[in-house]
Amino acid sequence: MPADNLQKLCSESREKLKSAISIMETFLNEQALSQLVPDQDEENLHFYKGFLSDVRTLLVFSEVSYEKLGVVQRRPNFDVDFAEKALYNLYHRSVNNFFYPKNESYSEDGRYAIQDKTRFVSVRSLCVQHATSL
């Protein structure tokens, strides 16, 4: 890939990560397990523990990728190999963890991926309501 395109891709990816990190941090800072499961229902408690764990993992990988892409942009001479490695890690850690969460608390509805209208199923209503209000 030409260096100009790679540099632009790094910049765009970093901006999108910044937005995603902000949303995840806000959600995690404002929600507690006791708020999400006030009745202490065992099934819901198990679900939300896994969901919050997946979001925290995704946040950490996203922050690491954000910092690496920042290093790519701040270097005086653009290092193509380092940029490619940073984008590779972004995909294999952040993107894959988003679409394939460890605790499988949500999943992508594949019928919508083809139409560029990604929709997720099996997410509890509170999480969906909170995410749409941000």
Image (cartoon, rainbow, N blue to C red):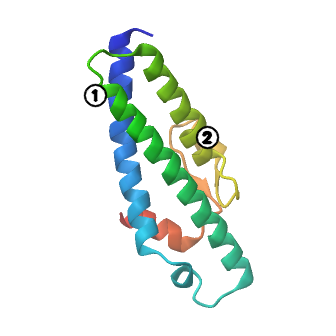
Q: Where is residue 112 in the image (x, y as percent from the top left)?
A: 58, 43
Q: How many labels does the image show?
A: 2
The residue wearing badge 1 is: 74
Q: In this view, does 28 lie to the left or right of 114?
A: left
| Residue 43 seen from this side | yes
In this view, the residue in front, 129 or 23, is 23
Calculate the distance from the C-alpha at mark 1 to the C-alpha at mark 2: 26 Å
Amino acid found under the numbered disc labelled 2:
Asn
Amino acid found under the numbered disc labelled 1:
Arg
Q: Position of residue 86 (x, y in %)?
A: 48, 28
In this view, the residue in front, 60 or 110, is 60
**Image point (45%, 10%), residue name:** 1
The residue wearing badge 2 is: 96
User: Does residue 129 sit above or below 75 in this rendering?
Assistant: below
User: Does residue 46 sit above or below 52 in this rendering?
Assistant: below
* Quarter of the figure with residue 53: bottom right
* Quarter of the figure with residue 55: bottom right
**Image point (28%, 28%), residue name:** 74
